[in-house]
Image (cartoon, rainbow, N blue to C red):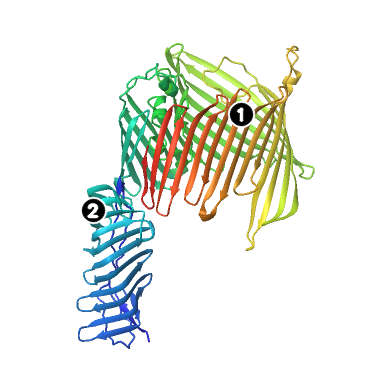
Amino acid sequence: MKHKKTLRSNKEAEILSRKSIIIIAILFLVGQAVLYADIIFAANNSSKEDIMGDENIPWHISANTLIYEEETQTYIAKGDVRITNGTKSIEAHKAIYNTKTGIANLEGDIRLMMGGDILTGQKGAFNLNSQTARINKGCLFIRENHYYIYGSEMEKLTDDTYLIKDCSLTTCSGDKPAWTINGSEVRVTKEGYGIVKHASFKARRLPFFYFPYLVFPVKTKRQSGLLPPQIGYSTLNGFDIEIPFYWAISDQTDATFFQRYLSKRGYLQGVEYRYLANRDSRGTFLLDVIKDKINEKDMNDPDALEISPGTRDNQMRYWLRGKLDQKLPYGLMARFDLDVVSDQDYLREFHKNLFGSQSRSELDHMLGRPVEEIRSPTRHSALRLNGDTEGYCLQAMASYDQTPEELLVDDVAHPLISLNYTMLPVQLFNLSAFFSLETDYDYIIRDDIWKNEAKNGHRIFLAPELKLPLWLFDRYLEFEPSIKYFYNIQSLEDPLGERDNLHKSNYEATIRLATCADRIFNFEWKDVKKLKHKISPVLKYTYHVNQDESDSFWYEERDGKSDRNMLSFSLENSLDAKSERKNGRVSYRQWMALDLSQGYDLDEARDNDKPEEKKEPFAPLNLSLSLYPFPALDLYGNINWDHYESVISSASLSCKVAVNRSGGRQDKYDISYYYTKDRKKNLALDIDFNLSERISITYLLARDMEMKENILAEYWLSYRSQCWGLSIGFEKEEEKEKTLMLIIHLLGFGNIKAL
């Protein structure tokens, strides 16, 4: 017969262990114990009684045999001993608890479970009064990171400090782990650090690294400390090593300092600062600075000219960039983009797959705004303040476009101050008429490269629009005429104070006719029950006229349109599928979208001023097709056909395929092709294929088909096991720079990278 007894403790303690930091070698070791205090036993082996502690939380004990010795005030439990309290439980073959000393001794297959962590051992002693413990031949499994921590002796010294002898750490399952980190002794302080003596990293039984002392963080929260180093070599920069340091400044802010040494270039210092106030307010700023050993570009070096054809004579080189979103009072929102570089060559020389800007935060993904491509002729910085309501949008902006290739000759117009007000369409007098307005003001500076003098000026732009949408023939035909007026004023002031005023006005009239027809078909295929085909023909006429012809504007015109008398037709098709699952859930997904459009220039067709020239009123025929009948297949194509030359003027094609394999693996194939008749042919491939459950290959290619040369080619061979992995990569960029890359993946610890 199984006897049961209810125990009580006045304190609970959960011991947590977290991630460590890799400093070439990796170490993590934590001891854990369960504490109980002041449990009073007051009955014999056949009675049942709840003994409550200070916090009124009952502990339940069960065993095949439960005996109480009143003389020694000791409880003896034997056979399938189980002590539980909520999600906490202790299992053992034998348990002896002395109510005088507060010590509970456990023997035989001890198993302690607290949350997701499991502590096992052969023999343990727990002092419930002092909250200290000792475990012999113990193992701690931390489920979150799949840590296995072994020790011949685990001692809990205080409420948050442990001393472990003959320790061993791994994330590999089984009796023969692929790798371990061993030490003679480690002292671990929860929410602090661990200090290991005689730490060694071993692959199987073969040692690779040794450190007399190794310090690692064991906090459950973000913590300052060294991050994994990166080591490598490239033909351009020589031996390359970077050791990042992470600083947890506060709950909302942190920073990473990148200390990087390149044997051929010098010491590069980098810093990345991040803050997160809430979902709408966040920002990241990065700065990299180097005093280059190569203080002047060799224009006779073909490799240097391959980077860019421009000269460079600056030794201090840098790249400052960042993005910020900040919510302000009164419904205002601020967005700040910063991008300034010392020279255009900087990005091309220090932008690598494992190091450089690619090892930093990806700003475009974090804040949803693009960053200029590394070969872009300009770097864009801007500050925007905007406030939106149901009736209007108000925005203030300042922007600056840097031209790194021509830093001494800056002839780009910079709108230092911009104000934009947009009134959304409002209905007029309960009529089927809608009025909208867009207005801009800019204060602009621009250097005149021909006269070697700076100019500044003002620009005002107004664009009111009136639309009259109507439904005809019992709402089968949509008829929408509209008219829009553009007025552009620019006032230019030179350094002598002389002012030159320019203005331009034009209007645009549009008539749009559209209808829509659809039909639903019964269709039985897997979960798909119905298909809906929708077709929308649209006929549009646009007449745009410039009324006033002034001198050329020194700043681009806001509407950016020339005279146009255009008739265009488009035919839009879509195919949507309705799916019904067995559980009754209904979902819709578009299978296909096919759009066909073409424009006809009426002025070109009527032009008789040059009868010797062939008229070409038809714009290229545009066809775009999107197919995604399966979640794992995405096809897209866009083609422009030139009637007069009977050629494809431009085309872009892409195909993305994902193939699910056993064990949660997935093969990916991504191919895209771009073509223009002016001899541009680019091909891009991205293939990730699993040769087996553990081995995969990746191939990346960007090729100029016209020049018959690769812009970038990258090859990866990867091996993955249960607790570790290895990736070897080779990169060849523009037939010049070659890089060999190595990444060691350790489950639960991250990656060790090398070039």
Q: 54 or 573: which is nearer to us?
A: 573
Task: Say which label, 2 or 1, has the lower sequence index.
Answer: 2
Residue 313 falls left or right of residue 638: left
Quadrant where the image shows the C terminus: top left
* Figure quadrant of residue 62: bottom left
| Residue 706, image x, y percentages | 57, 25
* Figure quadrant of residue 243: top left
Q: Secondary structure at mark 2?
A: strand
Vertical comparison of 65 with 323: above or below: below
* Residue of label 1: 675
Q: Secondary structure at mark 1?
A: strand
| Residue 254, image x, y percentages | 33, 44
Vertical comparison of 271 with 499: above or below: below
Residue 395 falls left or right of residue 193: right
Residue type of the residue flagged with mark 2: Val
Residue type of the residue flagged with mark 1: Tyr
Residue 21 falls left or right of residue 573: left
Tell me if I can see residue 479 in this picture: yes
Nearer the observer: mark 2 or 1; the answer is: 2
- Which residue of the protein is positioned furthest toward the right in this rendering? 473
Tell me what residue is drawn at x 49 percent, y 46 percent: 696
- The circle drawn on residue 196 is 2
Tell me what residue is drawn at x 63 percent, y 60 percent: 585
Vertical comparison of 26 with 144: above or below: above
| Residue 544, image x, y percentages | 67, 25
Q: 259 or 580: which is nearer to us?
A: 259
Tell me what residue is drawn at x 27 percent, y 66 percent: 137
